[in-house]
Image (cartoon, rainbow, N blue to C red):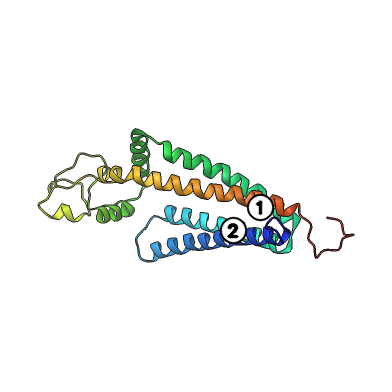
Amino acid sequence: MVCGGFACSRNALCALNVVYVLVGLLLIGVAAWGKGFGIVSSIHIIGGVLAVGFFLLLIAIVGLIGAVNHHQVMLFFYMIILGLVFLFQFGVSCSCLALSKSKQESLLSGAWGMLDNETRSTWEKSLNCCGFFNKTTAKDKGSAEHCSAACWESSSPCITCGMKMMEHADEALKILGGVGLFFSFTEILGVWLAMRYRNQKDPRANPSAFL
């Protein structure tokens, strides 16, 4: 049987959704691991990663069931949802790749302002920095402001967290945009496979049955 046949389309769609299941489980596992070991203490970050993982897992399960059973309704909704996810992810990925330095600084500053004190303290310890862009390059033990970084207790000056984040923000956004762009094209491949498979006739079905 040629690769364009019914069985090949079904197997390709199943394999693609198995990859989505694994990615969804990986996201959920990473979020749980990060929360359990205290690497990320913000409930908003954990909740966002968990939501993406569960959403991807749900879409993949719907696609798997629809592919195995050749279920017309499930495949239709799978195509619609995956198509919307493609448009959203494609736009976000292109935005990440085109983001300027000034816009990166503005976004990081806004995100830092939304963090609670516990999360800021975790970042300061992890990056060994103090504040964001508050120009505090040397510790002042008489100051009311306190920093959780190791540099605060030593004789070395403390670099602002904004400077450290900006060093890696451009590279991180390029990686994020590139990975997102790659996965967005796998999603449009999934839409095409589902559309093609949905319009194919199951050779095991009753020829006189309504399709």
Q: Quadrant of the C terminus?
A: bottom right
Residue at position x 42%, y 39% in the image: 97
Side of 182 relative to 210 (left or right): left
Residue with the most extreme front position: 2
Residue 96's spot in the image, x, y percent?
43, 41
Side of 183 relative to 6 (left or right): left
Disc 1 vs disc 2: Cβ atoms closer than 8 Å?
yes
Residue at position x 40%, y 36% in the image: 99
Residue 22's spot in the image, x, y percent?
52, 63
Q: In which quarter of the image is the N terminus?
A: bottom right
Using a 10 Å C-alpha cutoff, classify the residue at mark 1 as few (fewer than 14 neighbours), some (14 to 19) or many (20 or more): some
Side of 93 relative to 205 (left or right): left
In the image shown, does 31 or 176 lie closer to the viewer?
A: 176
Q: Is residue 47 above or below residue 168?
A: below
Q: Residue 16 carries which label?
A: 2
In the image shown, does 64 or 160 lie closer to the viewer?
A: 64
In space, the residues marked 1 and 2 are separated at their CA atoms by 10 Å
Residue at position x 26%, y 46% in the image: 164
Residue 48's spot in the image, x, y percent?
47, 53
Q: Which mark is residue 206?
A: none
Q: Residue tagged by mark 1?
A: 193
